[in-house]
Image (cartoon, rainbow, N blue to C red):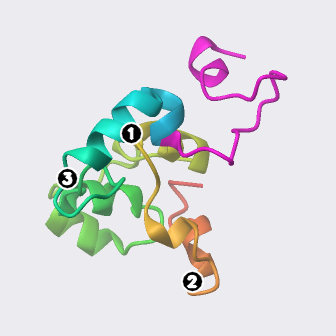
Amino acid sequence: LSFESQSLCCVDKSPWRDLSKTKFRLKKGDEQLDHTYLHADPPHHIPETISDLTYTMYRARCLPIHQLRSSVRDTFVPQHYPDSLAKLYKWSPDEATFEFYVTDSDPNIFYSRHAEMP
């Protein structure tokens, strides 16, 4: 395992992330989580909102190319987008978009509609 993946693994060095804790908690620690909660109005644990650009990048595998061209850049270059869910997870600073957790609403979030982005 790489150093990066080890930092998100469980104590037993499993390649799977400990889902009993949020990615934010694993990466930044309890103290930062508490600070975020205590200094927000109203108090919450959500560290930040993501921009439309970031949201579009996270959903690039399932959005139409014309939308990527209008939201991200005019020229579509598949290598500029996450090509797997693992890479998408690494790109995400804290947590994934809510669609990743609510697959009942649209399971297609996990499938790429673009041959260039398997």
Rendered view: 68 above or below 82: below
Q: Residue at x 60, y 12 (%)?
A: 3
Q: Nearer the viewer, residue 86 or 98?
A: 98
- Measure the alpha-carbon separation of dots 2 and 1: 30 Å
Q: Secondary structure at mark 2?
A: loop
Q: Is residue 113 among the parts visible in the rendering? A: no
**Viewed as shown, does residue 34 lie left or right of 25?**
left
Q: Earlier in the sequence, mark 1 or mark 3?
A: 1
Cβ–Cβ below 8 Å for labels 2 and 1? no
Q: Is residue 4 among the parts visible in the rendering? A: yes
**Viewed as shown, does residue 5 lie left or right of 98?**
right
Q: Which residue is the site of mark 3? A: 40
Rendered view: 69 above or below 67: above
Residue 110, position in %: x, y? 61, 66
Give the foreground label among 2 and 1: 1
**Viewed as shown, does residue 27 lie left or right of 20?**
left
Cβ–Cβ below 8 Å for labels 2 and 3? no
Q: Residue at x 30, y 61 (%)?
A: 55
Magenta range is 1-23
Q: Residues within 10 Å of mark 1 (few under 14, many from 20)?
A: some
Q: Which residue is the site of mark 1? A: 33
